[in-house]
Image (cartoon, rainbow, N blue to C red):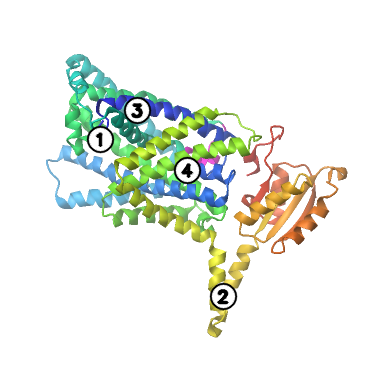
Amino acid sequence: TAVSGKLAPLCLVLVVVLLYMFRSVYGEVGSALPLNGGAYNVLLNTTTKVTASVAACLTLLSYTATAVVSASEAMQYFEEVLLFFADDLSSEVHWCVANLGTIGVLGFFALLNMVGISESAGVAVAIFIVHLITLTVLVVTCIVYVGMNGFDVLTSNWDYPSISGSYAVDLWYGFSAALLGVSGFETSSNYIEEQAPGVFPKTLRNMWIAVAIFNPLISLLSLCIINIDDIVSSEQNQDDLLSLMGQQAGGSWLQVWVSIDASIVLAGAVLTSYVGVIGLAKRMALDRCLPQFVLAENSICHTTHWLILIFFAVTSSLFAAVQGDVHTLSNVYSIAFLSVMSLFAIGNMLMKYKRASLPRSIHAWWSTVILGLIGVLIGLVGNVASDMESLAWFSLYFAITVLVVGLMFSRAFVLSVFYTFISRIPWCSRLSHSISGTIGGIMEQDIVFFAKSDKMHVINKALLYIKDNELSSSIKIVHVFENDEDIPPRLEECISLFDEMYPKMRIDLILVHASFNPRTVDRIAKLLDVPKNFMFVSCPDNRFPHEIADFG
């Protein structure tokens, strides 16, 4: 409302339409590639690992900013609740609530995720139900208020002039701002492996229904109750619009209720960030895009404690670094979040083109994906245009995130350069020997490719992908057959030829007498001691009897 005025309900309706398009975009990717990682997952299966990691960096940045901003704003709402019961708060109490309270929220949800995702899911469901009840009570109370007091405020607001001087610009900025209030779609796709079959599309549906009903309706009711001038002229009223509506329509009791609910929901967004980061970071670590120690699980709850503690440390230190001023982080979140959405749409289109034969239960039309992408890009440009300074802050934080992930990609090269210099110093022989062993351990990781035939162009394409995307010099071509006559006659000759063509890689052929199914792949992974994330197969077609997720 602050940027679009009386066009706010229309802006939210446009967002509802856009999210309806993205339901099928996310749903198609989730049904074809039901693996953790979201945009990283779909781009990893359609482009290069470097490209996919850029999407992962954007997602990690989005979650980090979301956690810090949500925890801080949750404490701001909590402070409003305290002010209702106390006339004034001392500066010491304010400092404790704003700073220690924020870090406390981040720490609480770190502890909750330490306990396990099932408990986290229970808390998330409880928060969602309470929030729906609160919004329903608020809407009903506002409708009764409007029925008793008439539409004088709405009529006055309808005569209010354009905020920016152009209704087209108002609509653009309003649509762009409204997009930021619907984050959550991308989170569910980052831990899809932990969801039961069929749950992911239902999650998208339920989220869309809630957004479609409440967001435009509450925006319209706000225009019937509160003057636009009161919203535009006060930043406090912009931040506390729902509680202001509750106070105006129902009194102090509803204002406090809405403030408590807002505090809880914002705290729930911190939980969402933890869950999303855990799912994505685990997938990246399995792909050697992040250090392997983050995969370590504790023996009590079997959760990735190092990963959770690192995210808590990063978010807490970031909050301390900005000294509680989370405005810049809000801008970083807006660009990162919309960038991830656009990359997901691009990944969907690439999957349609490169992985057309991949079985899927949901199909998004090309027109739907393209219109959805255009809509998100319009919102992304709108958010940048409304605050150009945000682009500079985003670039800074994004560069730091990319640097960390980039070091993991180039660690073998960096270590090799360091080894070249250190090996020439006599008294550093022990260190140089240790570095040499580390490099060898990185490059000796076996990569497996399941070859169905002896088509040289298919095998060569796989070898080139591995060469460009994986830190390995040891490749095993595995062919699974049920009958001896099924073995391609030129397969052994082809592998020998490729072994000579790529002198820096060792290429071996392994023949396995069995049926190609998840059980066989499990046995091969254990016998060769190769994680499944380092096993590749050509894109299956609709006749393939298994889903990709069945193979782990």
The crowding category of the residue bearing disc 3, from other C-alpha atoms within 10 Å (few below 14, some 14 to 19, many at least 20), is many
The CA distance from mark 1 to mark 2 is 61 Å
- Picture residue at 69% right of the left edge, 64% below the top: 504
Name the amino acid type tagged 1: Ser
Residue 287 drawn at (x, y percent): 57, 53
Verify whether residue 190 appears in magenta.
Answer: yes
Q: Are marks 4 and 2 in contact (CB under 8 Å)?
A: no
Residue 187 drawn at (x, y percent): 45, 40
The CA distance from mark 4 to mark 1 is 27 Å
What residue would you read off at disc 4? Answer: 117
What residue would you read off at disc 2? Answer: 420
The CA distance from mark 3 to mark 4 is 32 Å
What residue would you read off at disc 1? Answer: 259
Q: Name which quarter of the figure residue 254 lies in.
A: top left
Q: Name which quarter of the figure residue 211 lies in.
A: top left
- Residue 156 visible from this viewpoint: yes
Residue 252 drawn at (x, y percent): 18, 30
**Which mark is first along the chain, 1 or 3?**
3
**Which mark is first along the chain, 2 or 1?**
1
Name the amino acid type tagged 4: Ile
- Frontmost of labels 4 and 1 is 1
Q: Secondary structure at mark 1?
A: helix
What residue would you read off at disc 3? Answer: 12
Q: Secondary structure at mark 2?
A: helix
